[in-house]
Amino acid sequence: MHSKKIIIFPAARPSLFLAFFLAFIFFICSSADAESTTCRETDKTRADSRVNLGKKFNTSNIQEAEELQEDFDDEFDDEFDDESDSKTFDPLSGYNRFMTGFNDKLYYWAFKPVAQGYSFIMPEPGRLAINRCFRNLMFPIRLVNNLLQLKFKNAGIETLRFGVNTTVGILGFRDPARSYFNLNPCKEDFGQTLGRYGIGGGFHIVLPVFGPSNLRDAIGKIPDYFLNPVNYIKDGYEVVAVNAFDRANYGSLHIGEYEALQKDALDFYILMRDSYEQNRKMKIKE
C-alpha cells in the first residue's frame, strides 16, 4: 500500500506541476492583457487629451489669427482712410501746373547757372559760413513762433543759440552752439503756428520763385516777413539784393537735389505738391 502511494505520487506530480504552470501562464497573460488594456486606455486618454489640446491650440491660433487679421484690416482701413482724407484740395491745379513750369524754367535758366558760377568763385566753407550767418539772422522768426506755440523750452534754446553764435560764433558765421553745446535750431514759422492751432492748409498754391505752398502758409509769410531783420534795410533794392544773395548762396549748397527729385517723377507737379503738404503736416505735428 505504501509502495502504491509512492508510485501514484510521482505520476500525479507532473500533472499538478503542469496545472500550476498553466494557471501561472494564464495569470500572466491576464495581467498582461489588463495592463495592455490599461495602457491602451491611458494612451487613448493621452491621445484624446492631445487632440483636445491641439483643438484648443488650433482654436486659439485661429482666434489669434483672426484678431491679427482684424487688426491688419483696421490698420489698412485707417491708412486708406488717412490717404483718402489727405487728398490735397487743389482747385488751382491749372495755374499751379503753369507756375511749376515757370519756376522750373527760372531754375534752369537763372538760378542754377548763377549758383554754379557763384560756387565756382566761393569755396564751400565760405558758402557754409554765409549760410549760417543768414540763418542766425532769422532768429526773431523762430523765437516768436516758438513762443506763440508755447514751446518755451525751444524758445530758450533759440535764445541761447543766438547769444552764443552771435558772440563766440562771430555774428553767426560759426555755429559753436551746435558744435560744443549740442543746441540744435528749433525751426518754426507762422504757417506752422497757424497749423498748430488747428487752421488747415486750405487749397494748394504754387508761388512764383518760392515754389509750392498753400493758402495758410502763403498768408503766414506776411508776419514772417516783418520778423526778418533783412527786410528793415532802408533801401528796397538792397533788400532785394541781399535776399537774392542769400537764395543764391543757399542754392549753391543744394545743386542737384532738384534734379534728383525730377528724375524719376511720373508727374513732377503731383510729386512736389504732395511732398510739400506731407512735409508741412509732419512739421506741425512735431
Image (tube, rainbow, N blue to C red):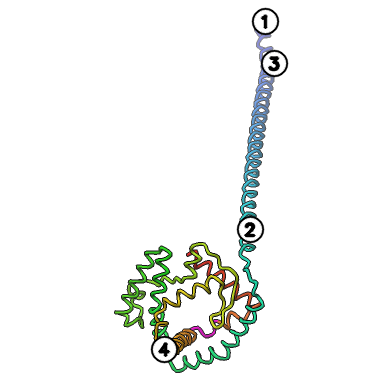
The mark lying in front, picked from 1 and 3, is 3
Residue at screen point 64% across, 63% down: 84
Residues in magenta?
253-257
Q: Which of marks 1 and 3 is nearer the N terminus?
A: 1
Which numbered disc covers residue 218? none
Side of 282 where 57 appears, left or right: right
- From the image, tell me which residue sits under label 3: 11
Cα distance between the residues tagged 1 and 3: 16 Å
* Membership of 254 in magenta stretch: yes
| N-term-proximal mark, 2 vs 1 | 1
Q: Which of marks 2 and 4 is in front?
A: 4
Circle 1/circle 3 CB separation < 8 Å: no
Q: Could you give the CA–CA distance between mark 1 and mark 4, rounded to whole angstroms?
A: 160 Å
Left or right: residue 167 versus residue 52 is left
Pick the front one: 124 or 16: 124
Q: In this view, does 158 lie above or below 25?
A: below
The residue labelled by disc 1 is: 1
Q: In which quarter of the image is residue 81?
A: bottom right
Q: Residue 220, image x and y in percent?
A: 49, 72
The amino acid pointed to by label 1 is: Met
**Label 4: element kind:** loop
Q: Report if residue 266 is visible in the image.
A: no
Q: Is residue 15 above or below residue 206?
A: above
> Crowdedness of circle 3 by 10 Å Cα count: few (<14), some, many (20+)?
few
